[in-house]
Amino acid sequence: MSKTTKQDSATEKDKLSEFEQHYFNSYDHYGIHEEMLQDTVRTLSYRNAIVQNKDFFKDKIVLDVGCGTGILSMFAAKNGAKHVIGVDMSSIIEMAQKIVDINGFSDKITLLRGKLEDVILPYDKVDIIVSEWMGYFLLYESMLDTVLYARDHYLKPDGLIFPDKCSIHIAGLEDSEYKHQKLDYWQDVYGFDYTPFVPVIMAEPIVDTVESSLINTTRTKIIEFDLNTVTLEDLSFKVPFKIQAKRQDTINGLITWFDNVFPAPKGRKPVEFSTGPYAPYTHWKQTVFYLEDDLECEKGDVLEGTLTCAPNKRNNRDLDVNIKYNFKAGGVDGEQRSVKNENQYLMH
Amino acid sequence: MSKTTKQDSATEKDKLSEFEQHYFNSYDHYGIHEEMLQDTVRTLSYRNAIVQNKDFFKDKIVLDVGCGTGILSMFAAKNGAKHVIGVDMSSIIEMAQKIVDINGFSDKITLLRGKLEDVILPYDKVDIIVSEWMGYFLLYESMLDTVLYARDHYLKPDGLIFPDKCSIHIAGLEDSEYKHQKLDYWQDVYGFDYTPFVPVIMAEPIVDTVESSLINTTRTKIIEFDLNTVTLEDLSFKVPFKIQAKRQDTINGLITWFDNVFPAPKGRKPVEFSTGPYAPYTHWKQTVFYLEDDLECEKGDVLEGTLTCAPNKRNNRDLDVNIKYNFKAGGVDGEQRSVKNENQYLMH
């Protein structure tokens, strides 16, 4: 069984673009793994999905895409897998190897350092892919492309992917205090006009936890990816949404989050978890898109539009997001409160 | 006057090492500039140092090394400078140009994108260098090497550097709760032994704010850099320290911070600011080195040793720090409480 050495990794790294090096290097540091492990919603969901489906894992070959410290590989090995292959580009895999060894899994888990597209797996096909690939807003700096590569090249036709259903959700929120504090700051910075920053700040979605009490519209699922069938092309999408004000208030931003579902036998409730504002904290928090307009809403007013999302052409791990919206207010002053607009965002 | 364009910057970037690209790219993002500007201790200290020394700046040529959003350049221009040259490698300089223009300083401030070592300044010599180059622990990822290059190539013999005296300080602290919580976590991570992480975590200094009440020894200045004379070689150093317990307690870490002093005419108190635990918050916080030992101290017990610091050979923006210590306890049980040890750290 091949263990990766520093020499191997140096060779692998020579093949990488500068951006890839930056991206993978950011996972070298222990702090990011500490944060992910200590996200108990995340980690226990994976554990529960594996423990509750030991029948799926019994005597199976499992591939862990982006294995990090090896936690998912060990969950799988401990719960019946015949053999687990963990692949990661980051130097953290050297730590994972020590952890795998010290926990007695050296024979059951093989760790390979490199890009999944480059490493040579000891099996032609695997039964199960496990991967924690999700980024902010599900897709930002995510490893989904690598998971799809693994699926298309290594997964048996009837193989399983953990998780295999991921959906993005949207709602409106009132966040005037923070929004205006964040934007007004640039009006007078030590006596100088720093307002050229305002459009840059407006164009950047904010990753933060949001009090669910700030949400003032219905919520809706805008897209769901079935990992068994989704293609790379599907990750660029344009989808409609329609939400409705729940009270008299101001809608000045849209909040988004994602939910994840793991495979389960027919008839059994699958393990799932949400990164939304109505669920416990996860390190993914939520992603807020401030609207250029402050929409004065009455209960029942409708905000509909489209959300377009695609990798940025200059840097394909950045995301371009465009939100077109058409706010249709009701009542006698409905016409004057109605607004149409289009805002462009860049996650980077 | 040359303004930098995106084409220029692409050319400049081609010359950079991968690490340099990673480093400079991290300053492209607005968030880091927002944090630095909103650090009022930092920014107002620079402003006060310039405003209180208008005589120094009157009709002078000023070089702002690593100008970022241009705030120090504008302070200098507003307070009498004849001309200011701001140099920065990051794309943030495009934003700085907009801000300089909108505030009416287009004629007084020239911004150049590139490495200071590569750009061509419109003057052979400058009268004053201003720079906010300091990193965590003063030297981590700092731009001091660039400031020294600027001094040696562009500063007139009697020129001034703002700030020009920077010193590092050390004291002992009791931080058992956080230290043990941070280390004990790895004993049982979802049922697995993750203790291979412990040495990695111990070797990494922690950048955080520390309650001054946790400090339980005297404090001492371990080194001071006079920017008018310091050389690159001086930034690798080995210095002794000696501190004394102020109460019966446990010393299980050393806290370090740095202070900065700006030039002032003879007889006038200079502007200075501290990043220490006895001063108001700055974004540099403090840097804590956990000791391998928990030293049970009585009031008056002496902890002495040496601190060695040098750029890491593999990555010269990382810092190797070595702390040798000799804890000499007093009293009847002094001998059994005395400890000698040596701990190695890497800031990265």
Image (cartoon, coloured by chain):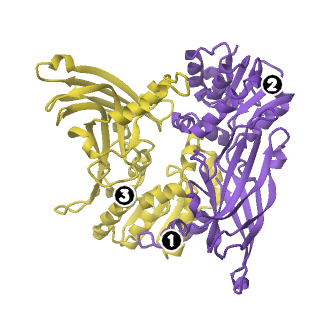
Chain colours: A yellow, B purple
Q: Hey, which residue is sitting farthest front in the picture?
A: B267
- In the displayed structure, would residue A279 be above or below residue A78? above
Q: Chain of mark 1?
A: B
**Camera sees residue A264:** yes
User: Do discs 1 and 3 belong to a common subunit?
Assistant: no
Query: Picture coordinates of residue B48 (x, y %)?
Result: 66, 32
Residue corresponding to mark 3: A42
Q: Earlier in the sequence, mark 2 or mark 1?
A: 2
Q: Amino acid at mark 3?
A: Arg
* Residue at x 50% of width, y 25% of height: A188
Which mark is in front, 2 or 1? 2
Where in the figure is residue B240, as x and y percent of width and height? 80, 62
Q: Are marks 2 and 1 in contact (CB under 8 Å)?
A: no
For the residue marked with disc 1, what is the amino acid? Answer: Asp
Q: Amino acid at mark 2?
A: Asp
- Residue B127's tag is 2
Q: Chain of mark 3?
A: A
Q: Is residue A8 above or below residue B27?
A: below
User: Residue visible at 33% across and 68% down?
Assistant: A57
Residue B184: image tag = 1
Q: CA distance from mark 2 to mark 1?
A: 54 Å
Report the Cα–Cα distance between label 1 and label 3: 21 Å
At numbered mark 3, what does the secondary structure look like: helix, strand or loop? helix
Q: CA distance from mark 3 to mark 2?
A: 57 Å
Is residue A268 found left or right of B67 in the rendered image? Answer: left
Query: Where's residue B222, x and y in %?
Result: 77, 56
- Residue nearest the observer in this picture, B194 or B52: B52
* Dot 1: element: helix
Q: What secondary structure is marked by label 2?
A: strand
**Which quadrant of the view contains residue B45?**
top right
